[in-house]
Every structure is written in C-alpha cells, then in structure tokens.
Amino acid sequence: MTCVVRFALAGFALLALAGAAGAEEDNSALLVDLFAKICAPKPAKPSQVERIATGQGFVSDGGPITAEMERGPRMDLLYSAKLIRRGERLGSMTAYFAGPDDAPSVTCTVSAVGVSADALPGLIETSLKARERTNKPSSDDDHHLASWRVGSGSGDTLDMSVWRTSPHRASITINYYATKR
C-alpha cells in the first residue's frame, strides 16, 4: 500500500512539474507588457526607445545611441536589442527611425518565444485597447496573422504574428510618425 501511495504522489508531482513548465512557457502577457511599455507610447527618438528598453532588461546589439545619431535633417537609424533571462534568449526588439528628424516614420517591434497563439489576441485587445481586429491570410495553418486599429482616431495599426508550433515565436509591431513632444 505504501508503494502505491508513493507512486501516486510521484505521479502528482510529475503532473505539477509539467503544469509549472507549461505555465512558465507562456510569455504572452510578458510580450504584451513589454510592447505596451516600449512601443505603444510611440517614442519620438531612438534614445527614448533605448532608455525604455534598457529599463526593461534589454541589451543593445550595438553601441549606445548618441546625440549625433539623432541630429541632422534626416534620420536613418535601427536600434535593436535582446532580452535574456536565466541564460535563455527570451525576446528581442527593434525600432527603425527614418525620415525628417522632426517627424520620422517609426516601425517598432517586440518579439518573444513561448507565446500562446490562443491567448495573445485577447491580451492585445484588452491590454492595448486594440479594436477592429482583422485576421490576415497565412500560407501556413500554424502561423496566425492579425491587425488592429489603436489610438483614438489616429489610424495607427498594430500587427501581430504568432506561430502555433515550437518555440511559439510571436511579435507585435506598430508603425507611426513620431512627433516631438
């Protein structure tokens, strides 16, 4: 009888570990939170993106953004950084600034692995106040693409790309024109 109880307890322990591992893998809320902090505020300058991303634990792939990089009549700058936790690359982000320095076009993207294709759209809609979802066609059933309108009458769109297969990669992107505040 004692052996049966030990076996049952061991089975429950394994189920608990499997559940915990599955729960650890879902980085959907983390992805939405990082996007909300880095890209959704629509930073007007690369140095603003760098400061926010660094504060969230991202490490730049290149050197720091300098004042000289942001000066001049036109901007053409790509900032990229990665997020590493517990020795694993959990995510990355990029922000591309192009055009006149007083109102550049910006494409800001945050990506992560371990994201649930089922949970992500709902989190985007509730956390980022995105509306009017349009699902986009994909050539692969395991790849889900969608787009939303965000902001109050601004016409900005937010795009999502998420894979249902391992390692469950996903990204959220916004394109906007930055204005100095």
Image (cartoon, helix red, strand yellow):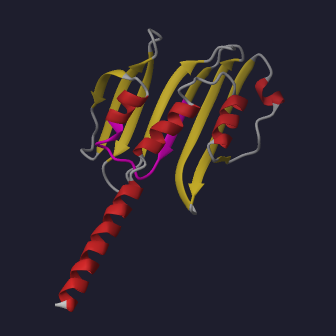
Residue ID at (45%, 37%): 32
Q: Dividing the picture into quarters, in which one does residue 144 lie?
A: top left
Q: Is residue 4 placed above or below 161 in the rendered structure?
A: below
Residue furthest top in the image? 153
Residue 24: x %, y % from top left: 41, 57
Residue 162: x %, y % from top left: 36, 42
Classify the position of the N terminus by image quarter. bottom left
Residue 11: x %, y % from top left: 25, 77
Classify the position of the C terminus by image quarter. top right
Residue 15: x %, y % from top left: 27, 69
Residue 61 on the magenta segment: no
Q: Is residue 130 placed above or below 37 in the rendered structure?
A: above
Residue 120 on the magenta segment: yes
Q: In this view, does 94 lie to the left or right of 64?
A: left
Q: Give the range drawn in magenta.
A: 108-121
| Label total for image | 0
Residue furthest front in the image? 2
Q: Nearer the viewer, residue 27 or 110?
A: 27
Residue ID at (60%, 33%): 95
Residue ID at (67%, 48%): 61
Residue ID at (49%, 37%): 33
Q: In this view, does 2 lie to the left or right of 165?
A: left
Q: In this view, does 180 lie to the left or right of 160?
A: right
Residue furthest left in the image? 1
Q: In this view, does 85 lie to the left or right of 131?
A: right
